[in-house]
Amino acid sequence: MKRLTILLLIMLTLTTVIAMSEPPEGMVLVPAGEFTMGTDEPNTPDDQRPARQVNVDAFYIDKHEITNAQFKEFILADGYKKREYWTKEGWDFIRKKRKLPVDPPETYHIDAPLGFGGNSVSTDPDHPVIGISWYEAAAYAKWVGKRLPTEAEWEKAARGTDARKYPWGNKFDFSKLSYFPHHEKLSAVGSFPEGASPYGVMDMAGSVAEWCADNVDSKDTKVVRGGGWDALRLQLRCTHRKKKPPVYRYYNTGFRCAKDAK
C-alpha cells in the first residue's frame, strides 16, 4: 500500500511537471522565483525606485500583444453585449449613452476600441490592438479564460532575473523595437525577434504600452507598463510605469494576457 501511494505521488508530480512544461498555445512560461523589480538609478522617477527583490509564482504570459484580428473575434462574439465578461464599472462605462456631434443629435454605446479599423497607426489584422481601456482589456482576457498580468509579472517577463534595462539587454538599440519615427506605423506583433525578453516574450519595449491588473491607490487608477511607439527613450526601460484611469483609451496603449501556471 505504501509503495502504491509513493508511485501515485510520483505520477502526479510528473503529470504536473509535464503540464507546466507545455504552455498554452501562444504563451510562454515564466518560472517561479525572485527577480529584481525597480531600479536604483537616480535619473528615474520615484515610483520606480528602489530596486528590491520580489518573489513571483510561476505564470504564463502571451508571447505577443493582442492583435486587431484577435480582438475582432471578441467583438464578433458579442463580447460588448455580454455582461458576464465585465466588471460592474466596466459595464457601466461601455453602456453609458454618449452623444455624437451631429445635427440632429445621435447617441451611441462603446462597442469597439477607439478608432478600431479606422486609425492610421495600427492598420493590419496582425498589428497590436490600440485605443483600448482597462475595462475592455480585462473583459477580453476573461472571455479567453485568462487575465491581465500583474505589474510584477509583467516586469519579470520583460527583464528576467538579471535586472537588465531593456528586454534584450542593457544597451539601447532602435533596431530591436517598433518605434516611431523609425517606422511609419506599428509593425506586426513579433516583428523584432532580437528584441525579445529572456523568456522569449516579444515587443515589451516599443510597439504599445500595456495594461496591467494592478490598482494604484484605488480601483480608479490602474498601471500601464512599458513604453509604446511614441515613448521617450527613458520610458522604454523595463521599469517604466504610468498611472491611468481605467477609462483611458489612446492610440499608444494595448495589452497582453496572462494565466496562472497550475
Image (cartoon, grey):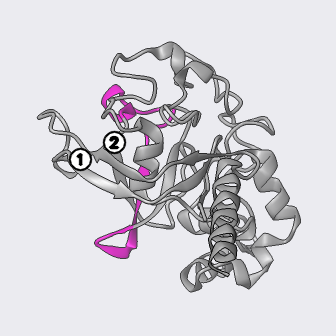
> Which amino acid type is marked by label 2?
His
Mark 2 lies on a secondary structure that is loop
Observer able to see residue 101: no
Residue drawn at 51 percent across, 37 percent down: 204
Is residue 21 or residue 221 the one in the foreground? 21
> Which amino acid type is marked by label 1?
Gln
Residue 250 picture location, percent across and down: 54, 50
Residue pointed to by mark 2? 240
Observer able to see residue 37: yes
| Residue sitting at the far right | 76
Which numbered marker is on residue 48? Answer: 1
Residue 93 picture location, percent across and down: 59, 77
Classify residue 175 as left or right of residue 139: left
Is residue 184 or residue 125 the one in the foreground? 125
Residue 18 picture location, percent across and down: 69, 53
Quadrant into which the C terminus falls: bottom right
Classify residue 158 as left or right of residue 76: left
Residue drawn at 67 percent across, 30 percent down: 190
Q: Quadrant of residue 42?
A: top left
Classify residue 216 as left or right of residue 203: left
Residue neighbourhood size for the residue with mark 2, other residues' Cα within 10 Å, grouped as few (<14), some (14–19), many (≥20): many
Residue neighbourhood size for the residue with mark 1, other residues' Cα within 10 Å, grouped as few (<14), some (14–19), many (≥20): some
Mark 1 lies on a secondary structure that is helix
State yes or no: residue 227 in magenta: yes
Is residue 230 or residue 134 the one in the foreground? 134
Q: Are marks 1 and 2 in contact (CB under 8 Å)?
A: yes
* Distance of label 1 from label 2 (alpha carbons): 7 Å
State yes or no: residue 175 in magenta: no
Residue 232 picture location, percent across and down: 36, 30
Compare marks 1 and 2 and give the one earlier in the sequence: 1
Span colored in magenta = 215-237
